[in-house]
Amino acid sequence: MDASVIVVGAGPAGLMLAAELRLGGVDVIVLERLPAPTGESRGLGFTARTMEVFDQRGILPAFGPVETSTQGHFGGQPVDFGVLEGAHYGVKAVPQSKTEAVLEAWALDLGVDLRRGHEVEGIEDGGDHVVLVTRGPEGPRRLTARWAVGCDGGRSTVRKQAGFDFPGASATREMFLADIRGCEITPRPIGETVPNGMVMSAPLGDGIDRIIVCERGAPARRRTGPPPYAEVAAAWQRLTGQDISHGEPVWVSAFGDPARQVTTYRRGRVLLAGDAAHVHLPAGGQGMNVSIQDSANLGWKLAAVASGRAPESLLDTYHAERHPVGRRLLMNTQAQGMLFLSGDEMQPLRDVLAELIRYDDVSRHLAGMVSGLDIRYDLGAGDHPLLGMRMPDQELITASGKTTSTELLHPARGVLLDLADDPGLRKTAGGWADRVDVVTATPHDLRPGSPLEGTRAVLVRPDGYVAWTSPGSDSGPAEALDRWFGSPR
C-alpha cells in the first residue's frame, strides 16, 4: 500500500480532510493536478460554522485578526444573522487563497504527503483496496490505497471514473466574476437587481474591486479558459452604464447555475466530498463552507475505520448525515437564484419575502440554513435540545483550570464531559480511553436558559456534534460510545 488513504484534490475540502485524517493517525497522500496554487479566490471569507470548525482544531489564529459581520442576505434580501444567539454571518474579506494556504500549512505540519502536478486518470476498485492510475512529473504510475476520496471539484475525475450517478439540472445561464484594479466601483455587497440582470461589487483593498455580473439571457457555455476581460467589461457597462474597460483585471472567471448531487457519497472504497459531490449556484458563499464541513464530518470517521478502531459501517453515517445537507444546499441556492436572477415577474415574491424577513423566526430560519448553524443529525433517540446539534462554545472549570468545550476538540478526539463528577460514568468510559477524553468539569457562567442547564454529561464527537446526553438520551453512554467510537478495548 502506498497509503491508507489517497485524497484527490488540494482545495479546501481535500486539505481539510487530509489534516483530519492525520489527526486520526492515518497516513495520507494528496494528489493535486495543478503544479502550484492558483492564487485565485472565488470565496471571500467563511461562515460562522466554518469559523467554529477551524476554532475546534486550533487553527483560527493562523488567519490573524478577523472581522465578522451579522449582515447577510437570502436571494438579495437582507437578513440580520445576529438574530441567532451569539452568531454572525461569517468572517469577511478572507480570500479563499488565504484559507487554502492556512489549511495547507496545517496539513503539511501534520505530515500530509502533498504531491502537486499529479493527475488521476483512472480508478480501479480492488475490493479491499483502490488503485489510482496517475500521471505526474515522473510519468505514469499506479498508486494503491485502502481508501480513496475525490475532493477534485465540480468536474471531478474521481466521480466519473468511479461511476457515481450525478443527477440534476445543468447550468442555464453564465455569469462572470472578476477582480479589477484601478476602477472606482460603487459597493453593492449583497448585489443589486437591475434591468436585464444582477450586479454585485465589493472593495477588496489595495485598489481592487470584486465584481459579479449576471446578464439575463446569457446562455451557459462550457469554456476551456477564462472569458476575455473585454467581454466582462462590456456586460458590466450594459447593466450599470459604467465603463470599466480601462481597469486591470487581476483574474477573471465564468460560472453557471447547475444543481447536481451524487446519489450516494460512497461507492465501495471510493468516497466524495465537496464540489465533487454537489454543484450549485454560489449563492451566499456556501460552497466552500459546506465542502469543508463535509470533510470535517468524514475525516474522523474514515480515520477510525482505516486504522481499525471502528467498523466500516461507521462510514454509512457520512452519507446519511451529509447527503441531506447537500440536498438542502441545492434547494436554497436554487431558490436564491430564482429570487435574485429572475426578472420583474419575481418582484411580488421578493416583496413578500422582504415582509416575512421582518419576523425574527423567519430570519432565524434563513440565517440557520445559510450559515449551517441549524444542522441537526439523527444521533439517537432523545429529547435534549443539543442532541444532534453542534456543541456551543462553553467555558469550563476543571481541576487543572479553565478551558472551553472548543479547546477540548483540538486533538480531534471524542470528548465526554462529566458535568456531575460521576465516577460510574468515568468507569464506563474507560474502555474507550484511547479514543475519547473524559473531562470532569463545571460550566462557568452558564447563561439563563442554556441548553446545558441541568445536564449531567455530554458526549461530543470529534466534529463537534453532540452524540449523547444525560439526561435527554434514551440510550446509555456505553451504547453511544460503541456506536460512534467502535468496541471498547
Image (spheres, rainbow, N blue to C red):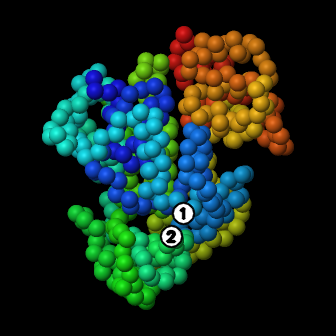
Dot 2: within a 10 Å radius of its alpha carbon, few (fewer than 14), some, or many (20 or more) residues?
Answer: some
- Can you identify the residue that label 1 sits on? 93
Q: In which quadrant of the rendered view does residue 233 lie? A: bottom left
The residue located at (36%, 74%) in the rendering is 249
Residue type (three-letter) at the residue carrying disc 1: Ala
The residue located at (38%, 61%) in the rendering is 40
Q: CA distance from mark 2 to mark 1?
A: 7 Å
From the viewer's side, name the closer residue of 101 and 472: 101
The residue located at (60%, 12%) in the rendering is 431
- Residues under numbered marks 2 and 1 in contact, where contact means CB atoms less than 8 Å apart: yes
Q: In which quadrant of the rendered view does residue 165 lie? A: top left
Answer above or below: position of 245 versus 27.
below
Residue type (three-letter) at the residue carrying disc 2: Leu
Q: Does residue 248 appear anywhere in the picture?
A: yes
Q: Does residue 371 appear anywhere in the picture?
A: no
How far from the left and from the top, in percent, is residue 2? 28, 27
Res. 204 mark: 2
